[in-house]
Amino acid sequence: MKVKKKTAMLVSFTLGTLLLATTALADIATKSGYDQLKDALKVTAEQSSEKFDSFTMDLSIAMKDNGKTLMTENEIRKYNRSMSATESLSSGEDLTRGKHNSQVYLDKTTMIRVSDSDPTYYVTEFTKERKEETFSNPFKENRAEDIEKIADAVVGSLKDHVVVTENPDGSKGLAGSLTEVQIPSLVNAVASFQMKQEFDGRQDNLPHLTKDVFVKEVKGTAKVNKDGVLESILGTAQLSGIDDQGTVHEVTIEVLGKLSGINSTTVTKPDLSGKTVIKNIANSDNSSSEITSPEKFVGKFKNDILIEKNNKFVKVGERFIEISQIDNETVTGRYYEVFKPGYEEYTTPNRDFAINAKRANEKNSSDYEYTTSSGIKGNLFFDQYAGKIFLNGRTPSLGSLIFDSTFNPDVE
Amino acid sequence: MAVFQAALVNEIEKLYKKKKALVAVLLSLAVIVLGQLVIVGVRSGFGLRGAGSLEFPMLVLSVVVNTVLPLFTALVAIDSFSGEFSHNSMRITLTRPVSRFKIYTAKITAIVIFILATLLLLLVFSMLVGFIFNTNSATLDSIVRTLFSYIVSLFPMIVLALGIVLLANLFKSGISVFFVSILIFIVLKVLGVVFSQYSSLFMTTQLDWYNLFLVNSFPLGKIVRQFLIMLGSGIMLFTAGLYLFDKKEF
């Protein structure tokens, strides 16, 4: 009897262990639909940024309220990785703005923009070749891994809602749908709160939802081809709520993404012949604050010295900056003030000094710093886009004078 | 069988006479009341629905299976074993002409009945509250799914109870069992988040396995795997606990 009991215990314990171990292994080996979707996304992002020479991405969004279309947006992006060129065509329609569409072409040296509201082609030519990648893999970004972990935790038990159907040709179909009961209350509450902010009545084409807002349904389907690349993904979300008049609104948002024309997409530069073209030259390196052809700042810049008198602004004189030499390292010039006859009483000391400014050492700073002979420090900033000079100096009290740090070119 | 029945009735009566079971029930009801207050607050404050008549029982379940229920399962299980060890009342139980296996099984059955009773009580009350206070969103399908979710939540709870019983037979004092259980619970929860790809193996993730019964496509494979994992660990924990209980000297 004693032996029998021990054997029984041993047998049942072994049985339990075996059962646990085998199913655990089987469970780890089986990839949930959610994991397969994630894999497909990763493969697609990697192939698009490293392997495919060219491809077309098509993204559409539509929003409907009780079946009435509120807004549609469509964007077709053509990528050519070997030429580093992209072309995007976007079009859309909404209730307030009506139809609109625009086109942007971008390659290593040029950017061309045009839209139907303004038939002018805006061409930007870059002085240096751009080094940016045509399509960068979002999964390679620094925080991608952390974000993935957070997403996994949030999705949690919803992972199993994604159903996979395998087709005989090796392609896969993924589908999933969640209704009210299946969406965790907290997720539903946070999502509906976010959506409610969108429908706050500030945009007149959207319904103003005030009460009983909740996410009714979320659906999605995706197609993965035999190479594991995501070919299309469609998501639909339905939001329900009541507006201030008591009408029930069912707002549907549909998002469709498609990837096509792998290695067979052609990106064509718009033909500019016979079109109105506005050209502009830019430094492609955005982080650099270098002034292109700084000589343009040589000359006289001025602004008015104003005072407030009897509730009116009265001009009492002019401030001048004269730049005699400028390059991307140093600036020399002079600052002085000239008062109109009768207003000389406002003249303050130390307001006429030579400027010997040097570019600040800090990275990305485009300020030129100077110290006057009387020991006052200040700096100059040249705004090449607005054609203005900004002067920031620690100036002694100005009394009733109104100080203006912006200087415009004195071109007359 | 008659002997086992007598032992079971004995255990249930002991459980029933203790205040802990009552406190557990009251606290569960408090969760319902508090949950409904939060929903009402969210509804009038933010203008969100919060939860419909059938989402409410699910909301209550998702809160209770991760908080009140494991806590009181632990308390009841510890009381039934460690409590009796330290009060020496286990000797009285063992002097009866009942085998240790039967006593052990009777004790566990009593705990299971306690969990089931709490779950059913929660189901009834949360459904009532849900229907009275919230917008009606019920369909026959969702009612069946809700019922199922409550009932299947019993299984991971049993595994949890068996784990705690094993600990109660391992350690002498009830307090150390309680704290070790809580520590393990938290560690498993954290591991479930960090190693989310293996999360289905952790006992704490299985507490949420009722979600599988809500999936439209009814993922049978996944349900069977999860059930077998629970069954396997349940058998292991039961046998290990029984071995210790059988060897114990009083």
Image (cartoon, coloured by chain):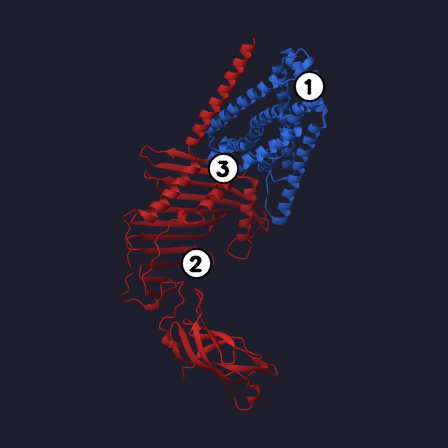
**Residue A61 at x, y percent in the picture:** 43, 50
The answer to whether marks 1 and 2 sit on the same chain is: no
Q: In this view, does A55 lie to the left or right of B174?
A: left
SS class of the residue under badge 2? strand
Disc 3: which residue: A158
Find the distance from the CA under tag 3 to the CA under tag 1: 45 Å
CB under 8 Å between callouts 3 and 1? no
Residue B30: image quadrant is top right
Residue B59: image quadrant is top right
SS class of the residue under badge 1? helix
The answer to whether marks 3 and 1 sit on the same chain is: no
- Image height check: is A11 above or below B164? above
Q: Return the chain for callout 2.
A: A
How packed mark 2 is, by other alpha carbons closer than 10 Å (few <14, some 14-19, many 20 or more), is few
Q: Return the chain for callout 1.
A: B
Drawn colour of chain B?
Answer: blue
- Image height check: is A264 above or below B247? below
- Image height check: is A290 above or below A215? below
Q: Return the chain for callout 3.
A: A
